[in-house]
Amino acid sequence: MSCSVPAVASRFARCASAWVKASQSRSNGSEADMKDVQDAKIGIVGAGAMGQGIAQIAAMAGLEVRLMDVNPAASGRAVAAIGSILDKLAAKGKLSSEQAQEALHRIHPEDSIGALSDCDLVVEAIVEKLDVKRSLFAQLEEVVRDDAVLASNTSSLSITAIAATCRLPERVAGYHFFNPVPLMKVVEVVRGLRSSDTTIDWLVSLARQLGHTAVRCRDMPGFIVNHAGRALNTEGLCIVQEGVTDEPTVDVIVREQMGFRMGPFELLDLTGLDVSHPVMESIYRQFYDEPRFRPSPITAIRLAGGMLGRKSGSGFYEYADTSTMSKSICAQGTAQWSTAPVWVSHRHPDEARRVLELLRALDVEVETSSEPSDNALIVVTPLGHDATTCAISEELDATRVVAVDTLLGFGNGSRRVIMPTPATTEEMLTRAQALFGIDGAPVSTLRDSGGFVAQRMIACIVNTACEIAQKRIGTPEDIDAAVRLGLGYPRGPLALGDHIGASRILAVLKGLLDVYGDPRYRPGVWLSRRAELNLSLGFSD
Ligand code: NAD
């Protein structure tokens, strides 16, 4: 059956006007919105991991919940699981037993879509397939009121595509929670091309009622969090693929130098490669083979071999007992420092100053001549470049050159990271390991690499977030909040870039581009303009 353009346009106009009328009561001011939100009845379709979590927080926030699953046993199981979580929370004194009982009684397992007819909002958390979700939304539109909001918890599908077959696409939006929902206190409110302001504002208000931070974003692959999260994993894989070091060393540097809770390989093992590898491929393809998101054959081979991570007992680490994570084993130099000449390159004066301050604090005498003496260890401080490029461009003796990563400074006993050129002698490398470990600080030694580990990781994380800001997928504030709460990074990526200095991040990327010639490292215009103009990366024009 075909339809003329005017006929479709007029049907669309009728539907839109029905939605506007039906939702007028909601849009009459923020007080009305809040009242609506407080009394909202929430339907949830899909009682798996996500549906269960959303049901729990909604019931704990005092809302009536109708929980429906195509498999009735799943809703029963979810309610029983919520009951035991609420009991545990009561036992820990987080809420009274009465509150726990009341919350549980607010959740009604249902066995048909028809039972959701009086819901103000239905959140879909079913299987991640576009045709199945579209068919569910069509069924929901048959039963709910015209002013009900329909939301999808999809991680990877387009909200616009889900809404495209709906009668009232204005009331459809993404409501992307994270697992486990009660602990991950952020939700992405995703605006499809046809989502109305009323729908988005109402979902943002509801998130507050649920105790979650709402971040608004445009309908783009990965939204904010899964988009921003590309950098850590794919750059970790690049580093290992290049043979710079092994996975445990990358993880320990990310934790002990960068201050992150987990390294990329620990994270991949936790999520499971059956989930992470297809997501890496999907986001890469959805951005039409953007080199910044390029997946790795390392995870493809491991996935094919069934080494998925914790869930299969074996991943980048072995899990004899699946409840505990294997400890990273990181080789560390044991050489003792005995006084020997040291010279520090001043090619990057600010970076050199960091090394000189450290060495002064460690009571190490440093040569002050403009060139190193014949037997001096030569310390270089590259941003983005490798030790070899420093040796060549500064006309230094490569057999005595060792580079040290200065990007994050040397505070608080954090891990120090060094790398020789391929020509550096064993004696000079051992001297450098002893020098930077004089006070017992842990030292990791890498093979020569553009940007060590931390510089590469941080530059990619900041650059990706800047691109998200440039594409106006979310505001700088929402990008930082989404990443802190959704990925657990210690700082939002734009705030991290400001903390380190946008011009230093830009220098790292230019150095990486110089060494590798890979467009993966090209700096985006958001970053380069703000770095050149000395503006905060959070500054929106
Ligand atoms: P899950 O497999 O744990 O649960 C899905 C549930 O939906 C199952 O109980 C299944 O019986 C039910 N179901 C399937 N088709 C249905 C239908 N047509 N009608 C009613 N019920 C149906 O899945 P999940 O991990 O909870 O994920 C659900 C959604 O949330 C997916 O879109 C996923 O992409 C998204 N998501 C998942 C996570 C995560 O970490 N698990 C995080 C964010 C978003």
Image: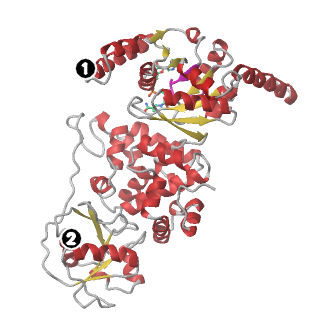
Tell me if 220 is positioned left or right of 295 in this view.
right
Name the residue tied to disc 2: 433
Rendering quarter of residue 330? bottom left
Labels 1, 2: front one: 1
Q: Residue at x 36, y 18 (%)?
A: 82
Q: Is residue 108 magenta?
A: no
Q: Residue placed farthest to the front in the image?
A: 31
Q: Which circle marks residue 102 in the picture?
A: none
Q: Residue at x 50, y 62 (%)?
A: 521
Structural crowding at the residue carrying mark 1, measured as other residues with C-alpha within 10 Å and reported as few (<14), some (14–19) or many (≥20):
few
Rendering quarter of residue 443? bottom left
Where residue 532 appears, x then y in whole percent?
A: 56, 69
Q: Nearer the viewer, residue 491 or 222?
A: 491
Vertical arrangement, residue 404 with respect to residue 248, above or below: below
Name the residue tied to disc 1: 91
Where residue 488 appears, x then y in whole percent?
A: 39, 44
Name the amino acid type tagged 2: Gln
Secondary structure under badge 1? helix
Tell me if 198 is positioned left or right of 461 in this view.
right
Q: Is residue 113 visible?
A: yes
Q: Is residue 308 visible?
A: no
Q: Earlier in the sequence, mark 1 or mark 2?
A: 1
Q: Nearer the viewer, residue 26 or 458?
A: 26
Do the CB atoms of the residues marked 1 and 2 lie less than 8 Å apart? no
Secondary structure under badge 2? helix
Query: Which residues, given as a range, are shown in magenta?
Result: 121-131
Instruction: Tell me how far mark 1 sits from mark 2, CA to CA.
Output: 51 Å
